[in-house]
Image: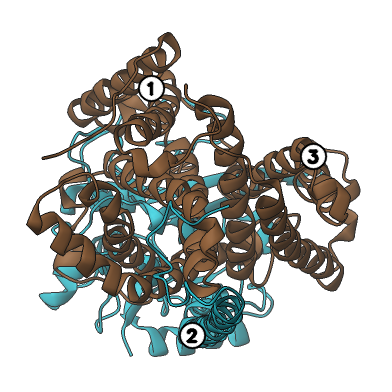
Amino acid sequence: MGKGMLIDLTKCMGCRGCQVACKQWNNLQAVPTEFNAEFTNPPVRSAYTWTTIDFLITEVDGKTVSTFTKQQCMHCEHPACESVCIAAAIKKTKAGPVTIDYDKCIGCRYCQVACPFGVPKYQFDKATPKMQKCTMCADRIEAGMETACAATCPSGAIKFGERADLLKMARERIAKGNGKYIDHIYGEEEAGGTAVLYLSGVPLDLTKLKQGVTEEEVPNFTWKAMRQLPALLGVVGLSSLGLMAYSSRRNAVAAAEEGARSGAGAGKHPSKGGKHHD
Amino acid sequence: MTSFGEYRLTRGKGALWLLFAAAIVVSIWRLFVGLGASTSLSDTTPWGLWKAWDVIVTVPLGASGFTMAFVRYMLKDARYEQIMRRSVIWAAIMYVSMGARLAFDIGLPWRIMNPLVFWGNIHSALFEVAWCVALYLIVLLVENGPRVTERIDRPWAHKLEHAIHWVGPAFVLFGVLLSSMHQSSLGTLYMIAGKRLDALWYHPWLNYIYLLTAVAAGLSVTILIEAVSSKMYKTPFQTNLLAKLGAAVGVALGIAFVWRLASLVIEGSVGALFRSDISSYLWWVEMLIGYVMPLTILARGAWRNDRRLLTWAAVGVLYGMISLRMNVVFTGMNEAMGASGYWPSLTEWLSSIGWTAGTLVVFTFLAEKLPGVLGDRVKKV
C-alpha cells in the first residue's frame, strides 16, 4: 500500500502554513489575489497554487460556524486522470502520489474534464503550458521525507504515513472521540478510495469537501465501454463480411440472369465507376 | 499527361477562402500567445468550442465517408458510386481539417503525434480515437486516391489505380471498423464524468448513442452534399437512392431515440425534462428538431421520397447530432465543472467558423479539379 495523508479538520486552525510550505517547496510563483468575504486566499487553486485552506463561514442554529478545509489533489487509488491520459503522462506511483510527466503531456486537458474533484490546473497563461497539481511531494517521499504541508502543520492536523495505517488511526479517533467526529472518513470510499483522507467534526456540507462524489472506481466508467470494443469490432466486421458475401452473390445472380437474357455483358467490372450508374 | 478540371472562383467561394485564411492566421497567432490569451478557456472550462465543434462534432460530420463506403462496397450497390465519391472526399476533408484544428487546441501542438509515436495509454478513449483517426486517414487516402490517379495518364498512375482498386474493399472494411471504434469512443470520452453529466444527457452507453447518431448524421451529410451538389453543379439528385439512405437514417436514429428515452425512464430522470430551465428547453428542442421531426418524415415512404422533406430531415438529424454533442460538453457539464459561464472568445469563433468555411471551399476546389467527383451532370454549368 502507498503513502497518504490524514487531514483532521477538527485540528486545523486555518493558519495556511501548508499553503506557504507548498509554494516554497515546489517553487510556485505568487499570484495576484483579492480580498473576499470567505478569507480563502488565494480565492481559487490554480496552476500556481496547488493547495488552499478553503474557509467556509455559515450559520447553524443561530451560531456562526467557521470551518477550514485543506484542499489539494486527493491522489486517488484508481485515478480518473491517469485512466484518461492520452499520453500516459499521469501515473499513480507505487509510493502513493499521482504524478504528471511534463515531458509526455501534450496538453489535451482531458484530465481536467475527468477529475471528479476538479484538481488538475493548467497554465493557460503560458505559450508552452504545463498541467499542474499537488504531487504529494513525490520527490520528498522518494528521499524518505514527509510532505511539505504535513511537515509544517503546527497543530498536527495533517498526518503523513501509510494509507492503511492512517485509516486505522482515523477509525480509532472516531471511536475514541466521544462524538467529536462525524462517523465518516472522507476518502475511504470516495472515488473508489483516495490516498488523502479526512476527518471532520461537522457534517460534510459544512466543509468545502466535494459532496456527492461517486464511490465507484471512476476509470470503470469508461473502461466498461472500451472493453467492449473487441466485441463491437467482431459484430461490425462479421456482419460487413457477411453482407459483402451476400451482395456479391446477389450481384452475380443478377448478372447471370441479365446475361441469360441478353446473352452478353455479364462479369463486367463493377467498380469502374461513373459509367454504369443510372 | 494530366487533365485536371478548371476551378472557378466566385465571390461566394472567395469569401469562404478569406474566412479560411483568417482562421489560419488566428491559429498561428494562438501558438505565440497561448491558450489563455486567445481563448475563453479556463480551469473550469478546459474543453471549449475548439474541442466540441472542431473535433467532437467535426468527426461525425465526416461520417459520410465510412457509411457510404459501406453502402457501395459492403452492399456492393454500384448505383451509389458517384454519391459515395462525393461523400468520401468530403470525409477526407473533414478528417484532415479536424486533425489540423485539434493540433491548435492542445497545449503543445508540436506534440500531437507523440502518443502515436511514443505510445500512450490504452485505457484512454482519447488515445483510441487518436489511433483510429490516424489510421482512418490512410483509408481515406486510399479511397480517394483513384480521383487523382484517374486524371494522370502515366503508367505509374495506372498501376497505382489498379493496385488501389485491388485493395480497395479491404481498406473499406478497415475504415468501417475504425470508424465504428472512434465514432463510439467520442461518446466514451464524457462517460468518465459518470453522473456528473446532467441527467438529461447522461446515458449509461453514451458510446453507442454516439455511434448510432454518427451513422445517421453521416448519411444525412451525404443527402445534404447531394442537395448542394445538385444545385451548384447540376449533378443528378437521385431521390430514389437517397430515400433508401433516409430509411437507414431513420432506423439508426430511431434506435438512438428510443434508447435515450428508455434510459431516462430507467434512470428515473423523467422529472428533469420538466425543470423549465434553459438546459431542459435545449433538450426538448434537440429531441423535437433532431429526432421527432426527421423520424416523422423518414417513417413514411412518400415523404422520404420527397426531395424537400428528405433534405429537411437530414438537416434535423444534423441539428440533433450537433446538439447532443454540444450539450454534453457545455450544458450538461456546466454545473459539474463549476458553472463558469463560458462563452467562446472572438478568436475561438473566428477559428471555428473559418476552418469550417475552409472545409466547404476546399470541397468545391477538389470537386471542380477532380472531375471524377462530380461525374455526369444533368446539364453543363
Q: Colour of chain A?
A: cyan
Which chain is the one coloured brown?
Answer: B
Return the residue nearer the eye: B201 or A141. Answer: B201
Where residue B173 sits, quadrant-wise, is: bottom left
Whole-number angstrom distance, CA of label 3 to CA of label 1: 36 Å
What is the three-letter code of the residue carrying label 2? Leu
The residue where tag 2 is placed is: A241
Amino acid under disc 3:
Leu
CA distance for labels 1 and 2: 46 Å
Query: Which residue bears the numbered disc 3?
Result: B309
Classify the position of the N terminus of chain A by image quarter: bottom left
In depth, the one of B318 and B369 nearer the eye is B369
Q: Earlier in the sequence, mark 3 or mark 1?
A: 3
Element on which disc 1 rests: helix
Disc 3 vs disc 1: which is toward the camera? 3
Chain of residue at mark 1:
B
- In which quadrant of the rendered view does residue A177 lie? bottom right
B17 relative to A176, above or below: above
| Residue found farthest to the front | A263
Q: Are marks 3 and 2 on the same chain?
A: no
User: Taking B138 as reference, is B8 left or right?
Assistant: right
- Horizontal and vertical percent position of residue B145: 26, 54
